[in-house]
Image (cartoon, grey):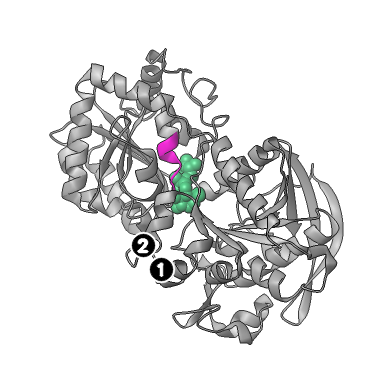
Amino acid sequence: MSRVLMISSEAAPFAKTGGLADVLGALPPELNALGDECAVVLPRYGSIDVSAAEKVYSGLRVYLGGGYYECDIYKKVVRGTQFFFVEHLGLYGRDGFYGDKFGDFGDNHIRYALLCSAALGIARYLFPTQIFHCHDWQAGLLPLFLKNFVTGDPAFYGAKTVFTIHNLGYQGLMPRSKLWEAGVEDRFYRSDLLEFNGAASLLKSGIVFADALTTVSPRYAEEIQTPEFGFGMDGLLRARRGALRGLLNGCDYDEWNPKTDPHIAMNFDADSLEGKLACKQSLLDEFGMGRRISRPLIGIVSRLAHQKGFDLVGSVLDEMLGWRDASLVVLGSGDKDTENLFAGYAQKYPDRMVFWHGFSNRMAHRIEAGSDLFLMPSRYEPCGLNQMYSLRYGTLPVVRATGGLDDTIDVETGFKFWRFDSWDLAECLRHALAVYADPPRLQSMQITAMGRDFSWAQSARGYSALYQELLSRS
Ligand code: ADP
Ligand code: GLC
């Protein structure tokens, strides 16, 4: 049994922009169920309601950059897991997690340095910790702080750090001149420490200083050691390969289960697929496209980021929506180019395509349930959760074979293409549509897909074993 404190910028149900939040909402309860003791530290963003939370510490002083910040700590217990919220109104009490319409907040380095330092305070006063499990660049300074600044404090003797890379594309860069504001002395600005292409990287801090590194699928653990996927950090990751392992994320089947899902028109499972048809009809009706239910319906739910590869889709849409007679529902927001692309096609094919701009958990569930195919043409995908949700809803994924998409989809459950090229995507979609046109084959794939099990228990066992290994080292 290990006492684990996770540090993250997101966790469902409190703050979510993507899969990181899903992981932090599901993995800690699973670890607790296994017998570890796992708690989570999050910023108390303005959107998080703490009125029903317990204030467990007042006036925690966090020293950074020659001054100090005073924080209050709140606690809420969800699914048997303690979530600690670091409140500092000046730094977190605003709209938006990482930025606003003008771009990223200019003080993110301070906001997330504060999170890391406050987490050490929480460990010291509220949750004695053996393992600090840090997620992505926002938590990248914690291993540096732990190894360099609190070494004399008995509260931290023997404590170890795990750093999980959910996405190497977000590197937490800041100018050298701002390091001191984040509580880091200039001596750490070295090419073998935080320096990265002329800036300081908080992601690199995590990679350099953590005792163990993980990423969220075995395939991505291999990929990030290559120049193609390494974002310039592949050399460092090769050097640290002995400390790196790929542990596949799981799927939260309490949240993503067509049998119990409260957001969908009719519940269903592998024995009652007519419910899925009712979900499709209801989704199409909601968008005024309900007259032709026989058309294959492709769904997309995603951050519209470069990583997700939607620039490939533009050149296949005329074929798919035109003479192949498919329909498309897209939910997401992000890059303006991608938004314009989807908005343009939605205008061109108003009876068969909808672009829902924004973020909606309800709509995400309805699209998973009502679509026939789910499209993820990612350039790279550390794990990807939506394809696992799709499997459970009998919605066959069409994916590029990269990272976790490659690890979770096979010929019995979905469709893969390898080269990041619109021709390869088009071929893959043609194949998927051919299967759609062959109902017995489609149904047999759907039933197989719905039976695949990517539950969190398996992943949690992997993390639990890693914690034990670290703690058994002197
Ligand atoms: P990433 O973390 O890179 O965004 P994942 O596939 O791991 O990709 O996780 C994405 C998560 O965010 C899923 O739970 C997905 O349903 C959710 N999501 C993404 N975009 C939206 C949106 N526009 N509305 C609702 N949920 C969304
Ligand atoms: C990142 C990745 C995604 C992964 C998620 C959770 O946002 O882009 O592939 O599933 O983190 O680990």
Would you say 301 lies left or right of 338 here?
A: right
Point out residue 326 in the picture as x, y percentages from the top left corner.
22, 32
In the image shown, does 312 or 194 lie closer to the viewer?
194
**What secondary structure is marked by label 1?**
helix
**What label does residue 229 carry, if any?**
2
Would you say 203 lies left or right of 425 here?
A: right
In the image shown, does 57 or 204 lie closer to the viewer?
204
Q: Is residue 151 above or below residue 228?
A: below
In the image shown, does 72 or 40 lie closer to the viewer?
40
| First of labels 2, 1 by sequence position | 2
Label 2 Cα neighbours within 10 Å, binned few <14 / some 14-19 / many ≥20: some
Q: Gap between marks 2 and 1, in whole Å?
A: 8 Å
**What secondary structure is marked by label 2?**
loop
Instruction: State the residue lying farthest toward the left.
Output: 323
Point out residue 212 in the picture as x, y percentages from the top left corner.
58, 60
Q: Start and end of the magenta stretch?
A: 383-388
Quadrant of the snapshot with the C terminus? bottom right
Residue type, label 2? Phe
User: Residue under circle 1?
Assistant: 234
Point out residue 345 in the picture as x, y percentages from the top left corner.
25, 45
